[in-house]
Amino acid sequence: MVPSWSASAWCAAALVAVFVLLTLWWLTQDHAVPYGDAAEELWAAFRFRDYTLHADVGAIFDYPAYYPPYGLLLGGLIAIVGGVGRNAVVLGANLVCVPLLALACYRVGRRVAGATAGALAVAFALGAPLLIEQLHVFIIDTFEATMVAVSVWLILASERFSRVGVAALAGLAIGIGTGTKEQFPLYVTGLIVVVLARGGWRNMRGLALFAGLALLLGAPWYVHKHDVLGKIYSASRTGEGLLFPVPPLARPPLLSAANVEWYGWATLNGLLFAPLALFAFVGVAVALARLRRPEVRASVVPELLGGLGGAWLLLTILTHKDMRYALPMIVYLAVLGTAWIALLPRAWRTVAGGGLAAAVVATTLGMTFGVGGPIPERLPGNLGAALGVGVPPRDRVVVYANHDYLVSGPRRDGDVLALLRGLHRAGVRTIYWDPAVAGPEHGDFNGAGLSVLGRMAGISVASRIAFGVILPGYALLMYQPAPPGTRPCVRFDSGMGVWALLPHAGGGAVSYCPGRGTTGTPIPVPAISQQAGATNLP
């Protein structure tokens, strides 16, 4: 039976379907080695799959990560259903997050300015360049942003906690979100303060249930890891002590212009780009101007403005800054940035809606298809980025770009996973490489990404290296320049290549590529860095 939805609701559902299908297409085209947080968190998802299958709750809460476990647990549950694979986990995360995020934006937008506004809010949110790219990888910021949107929707739907059942659902959403990432409360504090100030404090039963469930679900990891939280806070202030140092531009002095304007640049040049940012700016300005009207003050617009303003202020005070920390504000920006369009006369509404559609199409072309020329090797999500990891460009206004954070259009060069699967078929069960050339700043060849691909191929990573010899069942991966005329197993567009060396019966090593077999004569095993182990993944 076909649901009796409005045309706007069907439009929102169609946008969700198109978004997920485009992600599926992107995944089938991309051969890149995962890197950065996308590699670390995908590896964690595989580990959480193992813990869940063994009912090892202690391991889930003890996992040595800087983040609470619920987002990573989601990845583990998806891996149980879809298998140990990047595409399965990323697509599963899309199937969870995209419909929920869209539903929340639609319901809040409809509450503010009708069903058309709800559909426009969905288009805005799913057209945000940072969201598009982050949903091409598995990273918990997208789950955090989803739970912020769901929490905002349910808190508003609770009618200031007077609807006890909905207030309980809102508490569950807050608890799950808080158990996903430490920054989560920053995005809902302003909203909750305004809701309480406008009468929410009077509905004690709903408020108590909301707060109790939020604490019950969200607090356990924080109590368990209270010692770690102090270290993280201290490290974020000094820039040292974390797994990777916080770049100076990501921790400006509190009382400085650079700090005040930081998330302005992050929103303009990272989260939205100029066309969508213009819609958001106009929407916030219109909402503030319309507060003079009693019917607007009686609506949920003050709550949304309080939520957005509170998140912006708290993020500014937060010592460690990152472009992706702007992502969970998307529900506020999407709703406020499009609700004003629904209030325009029909002709102007058509013009503004067409402008929004053009902006969304442009970001989709850039972020999903990579339209627009060469893409830099060091995107802001990379530790080798020019300004430091997670720092947005601040010397220009980005109107259009085909790159943003971590990934962009699909990479069709360098299918390392196919190489590893071929090595597995040839009897290789363990791989290792020279850690000196596989640092986390390398997108093509990095320890975390290789470990993830190894797990997907059924190959483990050596915890210890036998120097000067390659053991039976082992392969040494060599990453080095591949001039024209050479035949590496994998060639990257950057001019680098990967060779696989296997042990030779008479001593030394021999080059082997799946499909081509052994090539050349035996050579001595190349010297590698004197390090015990090839990866820092737990």
Image (cartoon, rainbow, N blue to C red):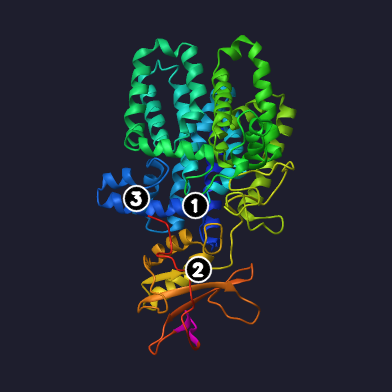
- Assess disc 3: are there few (<14), some (14-19) or many (≥20) residues with their C-alpha within 10 Å of its C-alpha: many
Is residue 512 in the magenta section?
A: yes
Residue 425 coordinates in the image, percent (x, y):
39, 76
Instruction: State whether residue 442 is above or below residue 130.
Output: below
Q: Which residue has dot 2 on it?
A: 416
- Nearest to N terminus: mark 1 or mark 3: 1
- Assess disc 1: are there few (<14), some (14-19) or many (≥20) residues with their C-alpha within 10 Å of its C-alpha: many
The magenta region covers: 509-519
Q: CA distance from mark 1 to mark 2?
A: 17 Å
Q: Which residue has dot 1 on it?
A: 38
- Assess disc 2: are there few (<14), some (14-19) or many (≥20) residues with their C-alpha within 10 Å of its C-alpha: many
Is residue 326 in the magenta section?
A: no
Instruction: State whether residue 275 is above or below residue 342.
Output: below
Q: Which residue has dot 3 on it?
A: 48
Which element is circle 2 on? helix
Q: Is residue 160 left or right of residue 224?
A: right
Q: CA distance from mark 1 to mark 3?
A: 15 Å
State which quadrant residue 312 falls in. top right
Identity, as a three-letter code, of the amino acid under mark 1: Ala
Most foreground residue, 293 or 386? 386
Identity, as a three-letter code, of the amino acid under mark 3: Phe
Most foreground residue, 424 or 436? 436
Identify the residue shown where x is 65% and y is 19%. 288
Most foreground residue, 412 or 364? 412
Mark sitting on residue 137: none
